[in-house]
Image: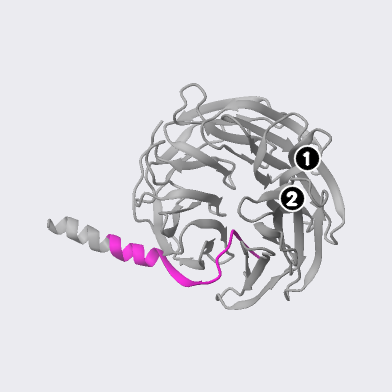
Amino acid sequence: MNRSIAVFMMALASQTSLAQTTAWSNEPGGVAVARDTIDNVFTARWDYNPAGDIYVAKRNAAGALQWEARFDNLDNTRHEVATFVAADTLGAVLVSGTIRSGFANPVNAASLLMKFDADGQLVWRRVYGNDFDGSSTRRVVMDPQNRAHVLGLGVCPGGLVSTVRQFNPDGSPGWIWCDSIGVGAPTMLKRTPDGQFVIAARSLFGSMQGFVRIDASGQTVWSLTGITSLTIGDIAGDALGNSYLVFADPDTGQGSRLRKVSPTGATLWERTHPMSAFRVEVTPAGDPVISGFPNSGTGGVAVAKYSAIGDGLWTNPDASGNGLLLHSAMLIDPDGAAYVSGSTLTDMGVVKVNADGTTAWSKLLPGGSTAGMTLGSENQVYVTGGLYTARIDQAPGVTIFGSDFES
């Protein structure tokens, strides 16, 4: 082997080991992961059996299990499915779920939200809609006042449609937003830096994408429907009230389109990219970052960054180097670095791309598919999946691969 190549490979291996370490990895896994203000970690899982329950686990930052709590469902004709978990500022945890009826071919029966205190005691449990209305939940998002906002399908005057339901800290209901314009079934809810909410939705039949922005009182600000997209799209907002939408290019069916819309929903600009993107987030500086597969037929992690005026800043066409599949989340840290979680089908995976587009590190952990990811307060990454939950500690300022710009 050429000596310079050998030296490079040794340095690369050394940098990789310094870039991150697995602090701990243990059972149980979960469908989602959240942390509180002192890095206690919460996960939620569920038991697919008659009278099956939702289980909520709390670990401290060192990974030691503090408790695992549940509400004991006694109905043998039903089981309860955990869908998301979120922590409030007081150390309590909220878990959303869907009550399903039947076992071999279950159907959605009702929606629920539960709150457990810091010691694992059930504070309240809300089964809403009615006992068998076909509703379901998808995600729960907290606001600074510790109010929960649950995304799901619910019964409204227009039938079973996308909904967001607000719950106060004591469990009493707040406002309800109902989809009255037909954006589709909900896939994503995010709270924007200006205190509003953005929703991505998908048609139940065909390949149509919809997007909505609602304000802090649950009123529709704008909506967009009928966007042809072969892939599931995403949405994120900035501090100025603008939104960024990503979806498959409707003209070609290949690659992706990034659209910026104003606070009133007017299109400001659009850009196309050859990657198959299905995640978008906004950096603290206000620049959109998209991620997905390098193209529609290739696994891996591609990440690209644009400026707020639509200039292409950089593209990292293969950040993972390991063909990562089943992407589950993208997060942006305070420095503007992007983290993408996914799976190789047998291992969980996380990739970090620095704010300048260089790959910081790419890591695989045992545990099957990655279901959720959150960032800690001291340079940690928490990830959960089918079997395990893990904490990755990372060294700051380490770069191990380069990147190239693509227009």
Q: Which picture quadrant has residue 100?
A: bottom right
Name the residue type under label 2.
Ala
For image coordinates 60% across by 35% down, the residue present is 244
Q: Is residue 334 visible?
A: yes
Q: Where in the figure is residue 404, as x and y percent of width and height? A: 35, 40
Residue identified by numbered label 1: 215
Name the residue type under label 1.
Asp
- Secondary structure under tag 1 reads loop
For image coordinates 44% across by 65% down, the residue present is 395
In the picture, which quadrant includes the C terminus? top left
Placement of 123 over or under 231, stated as above or below: below
Badge 1 local density, few (<14 within 10 Å), some, or many (20+)? some
In the picture, which quadrant includes the N terminus? bottom left
Q: Which mark is residue 314?
A: none
Q: Where in the figure is residue 75, as x and y percent of width and height? A: 75, 63
Q: Where in the figure is residue 355, as x and y percent of width and height? A: 47, 49
Residue identified by numbered label 2: 109
Q: Closer to the N terminus: mark 1 or mark 2?
A: 2
In the image: residue 227, left or right of residue 298 = right
- Secondary structure under tag 2 reads strand
Q: Is residue 218 visible?
A: no
Placement of 373 over or under 264, stated as above or below: below
What is the magenta range? 12-35
32 magenta-colored: yes
